[in-house]
Amino acid sequence: MTQTTRKDRTMANLRKASCLLSLAAVVFYAMSAAAQSPTDSCKPAQVIPLTVEQPPAKIVIDPPLPEPLASRGVVIIQYCAQNLHIAPVFGANALTASPRVGHVHVSLDDAPWVWADASGNPIILMGLPPGPHRVLLELEDANHHTLDKGTVAFVVPEKTATAKQ
Amino acid sequence: MLRKSKGANIIGSVNRVEVTCNPMRDAKHGRTWFGLGPATKQLQPTSAIMATVVLIAFLVHALSASAQSARDVKGPTPLVAIQNEAPAKLIVDPPIPEQLALGRVFIQYRTENLRILPVFGKAALDVSPRVGHLHYYVDDQSWPIVDTSGETVVLVGLPPGPHKVRLELADSLHRPIPGASKMVEFTIPAPKGPNN
């Protein structure tokens, strides 16, 4: 009899503890989510052919890394492609590859021309004139057709830009 | 007449040589058999000379085989440091003409004594074999586009007319490497139709 009540009490304590724990977990999650940058929750692309239909491709872009921008005027833009594997694979024949392959087109300050990047590495721009700028990132399929896009706006500080040529 | 019979004699033995050297003929380097041509003109059809021809053929074969080794094509392995590595070199092709005619600029390049990689910072300066990356400037752009992929440079949508792209190799601190800069000049043709 006493054994059962002790067991019950222990169970109740455990339940209480787990309740508190889950509350703490929720709070912690909310806090860490607030501190996250967009690419943190982006899953890297798979490379093995998929057996199910792939959701549409999306690009997730972080604002430029604050420290290099403030101290050296260097713009480092990290991005992540969802449901698209960034690779230097091109042409109409590559359109049906699974998982989807593609690359990004980058343009600065609404220029009519773009450069292509199939590395998946962060976009790095240095020596930009001080002042506000915009970088447009377009997620392209293997045949240069835009699937998604995003823009990042930022300001290159006056002092560092002149000091760093 | 004499020449003809000499030729006939040699052909007899050449057949043998050809069999031995087939792999060399298959080589995709378009190499001609320079060893055999002059030899057939001057030499007498004796067995000693035939042996010389075979020897030359073997030598040429060996040479061409070694020219296709992995290291010769791909460069040194990144796993072993290189003492006193030669200066970095940048080799740039003009834009691919067929693509340029369509208004797309595809510039192929390669490097020697520098591997294009997304590795940055002061510590990476001492890495051996050397690492670095590509900077390129379109027209009179004051700022470089930084490329760490090693892939063909692609520029799409440039307005018709003359343009230039300057490519340079940079170290891991983004400092241009002296002597490793190339300028490419080209003209984007006026669009022929309404669609690009």
Image: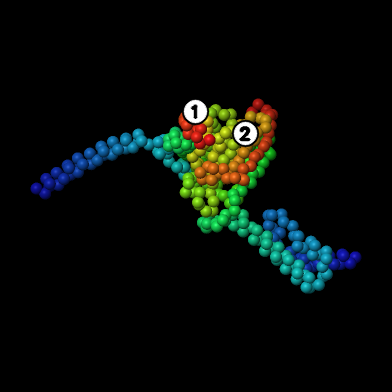
Q: Residues within 10 Å of mark 2 (few under 14, many from 20)?
A: few
Image point 48% across, 30% down: which residue? A158
Q: Secondary structure at mark 2?
A: loop
Q: Is residue B195 left or right of residue B144?
A: right
Q: Quadrant of residue B101?
A: top right
Q: Is residue A146 above or below residue B4?
A: above
| Residue B74 can be seen in this image | no
Which residue type does callout 1 highlight? Gly
Q: Which mark is residue A151?
A: none
Q: Is residue A118 left or right of residue A10?
A: right
Which residue type does callout 2 highlight? Asp
Image point 47% across, 42% down: which residue? A45
Q: Is residue B127 above or below residue B40?
A: above
Residue A82: x %, y % from top left = 46, 38
Image point 68% across, 39% down: which residue? B97
Mark 1 → mark 2, Cα distance in angstroms:
21 Å
Q: Secondary structure at mark 1?
A: strand
Residue furthest bottom in the image: B47
Residue nearer the viewer, A40 or A126: A126
Q: Which mark is residue B139?
A: 2
| Residue A109 can be seen in this image | yes
Residue A56: x %, y % from top left = 48, 35
Residue nearer the viewer, B131 or A143: B131
Please report, as a chain letter, where disc 2 is located: B
Residue A25: x %, y % from top left = 28, 39
* Residue, disc 1: A131
